[in-house]
Image (cartoon, rainbow, N blue to C red):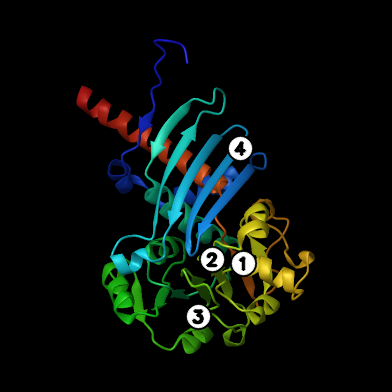
Amino acid sequence: MKAGLEMDVALVDPGSIEPHLEWSEVVDAIRSGHALPRASIADNLVQRGRDGLLLRSAWIDGLGSVVKCATVFPGNDDRGIPTIHGSVTLFDDRTGVPEAFLDFHQVTRWKTAADSLLGAQLLARKDSRSVLIIGAGTVARSLVPAYASRFQGIRFMVWNRTIARAEGMKAECSPLADIEVVTNIEAAAGEADIICCATMSAKPVLSGRWLKPGQHLDLIGSFRPDTREVDDDAILRSSLFVNSLETALGKAGEIIIPLETGVITRDRILGDLYDLVAGRIGRTSREEITLYKNGGGAHLDLMTARHLLDKWTSVRRNAGARDDN
């Protein structure tokens, strides 16, 4: 770097923009991002037992590039601290200069739930009126306002291994929607129109024999090749879609394990968000069970981070205009 050259890197304060964020706008940012050239994505996962260090990067021509670093420590639950920590850095597309440092948790929360919401909008039946959320952590709680924003009159059921945590989620999210804590996961799964799995479970928590025709499955929690949230029966009964072929085929146990054991073949994966947004694939009947693997991906973080930076810039500009007046 030349002497005296200064970079004006934005430090995006999450609190200043959180009240101005809307699910519809983040969903639209992800949808429009998939109309751009396909992202270049690279992932690297380093593990120490159950703990992991995940490095994700992406570049989209015309949008820029991003590097996201995340540590995943499942044992932190017992320590009373979040299981995931990290950082997000956004780079300019033309110069490669760092543009912004963004809050990891804010980017991840909005990106993850908006990704699942977009998948449901494209695949779930339009008359869906009930959602079962399996899990009661941070991601699970973000799904309530996300789904409620686009599915009018929808009600939620939440199941968690620890009932007290599910009750805590109900208390937090009840002002946003109708929420019921359930203890019989099989009965709830057979009733719901949409089932969202957002757990850190290494073994399936949802059985395919519990499913009914016409449901939509939204799988979020599994991020390693050796973990999965649904069993082979659920995979075999469903039409399979993923948010990203690159991340799903490389990292998602729901897809990798059935492929490696011969339960399914590669042609069962019908496509990803690029295909869904373009209208090349989708639900073909009311009775079809659709399964959407939300495997994350730094390209989605990039789309979300760009939107958050634009929102932060707009909020600051409007505040400055008010001060001038």
Q: Earlier in the sequence, mark 1 or mark 3?
A: 3
User: In whole angstroms, how far apart are the C-alphas of marks 3 and 2?
Assistant: 21 Å
User: In whole angstroms, how far apart are the C-alphas of marks 1 and 3?
Assistant: 24 Å
Amino acid tagged 1 = Gly
Could you tell me which quadrant the C terminus lies in?
A: top left
Q: Nearer the viewer, mark 2 or mark 4?
A: 2
Q: Nearer the viewer, mark 4 or mark 1?
A: 1
Please report contact status of discs 3 and 4: CB closer than 8 Å, yes or no: no
Q: Earlier in the sequence, mark 2 or mark 4?
A: 4
Please report contact status of discs 1 and 2: CB closer than 8 Å, yes or no: yes
- Residue 159: where, in percent of width, then height? 41, 79
Of residue 97 and residue 172, the one placed in the foreground of this image is: 97
Find residue 253 and name its label.
1
The residue identified by callout 3 is: 192
The quadrant where residue 12 appears: top left
- Residue 89: where, in percent of width, then height? 45, 37
In the rendered view, would you say 59 is above or below 183?
above
Q: Does residue 150 appear to the left or right of 38 in the view shown?
A: left
User: In whole angstroms, how far apart are the C-alphas of marks 2 and 4?
Assistant: 25 Å
The residue identified by callout 2 is: 222
**Tag 1: Cα neighbours inside 10 Å, few (<14), some, or many (≥20)?**
many
Q: Does residue 244 appear to the left or right of 120 in the view shown?
A: right
Q: Name which residue lies at 74% across and 76% down.
A: 263
Amino acid tagged 2 = Ser
Element at label 4: strand
Q: Earlier in the sequence, mark 4 or mark 1?
A: 4
- Residue 112: where, in percent of width, then height? 48, 56
Element at label 3: loop
Please report contact status of discs 2 and 4: CB closer than 8 Å, yes or no: no
Please report contact status of discs 4 and 1: CB closer than 8 Å, yes or no: no
The residue identified by callout 4 is: 60
Amino acid tagged 3 = Ala
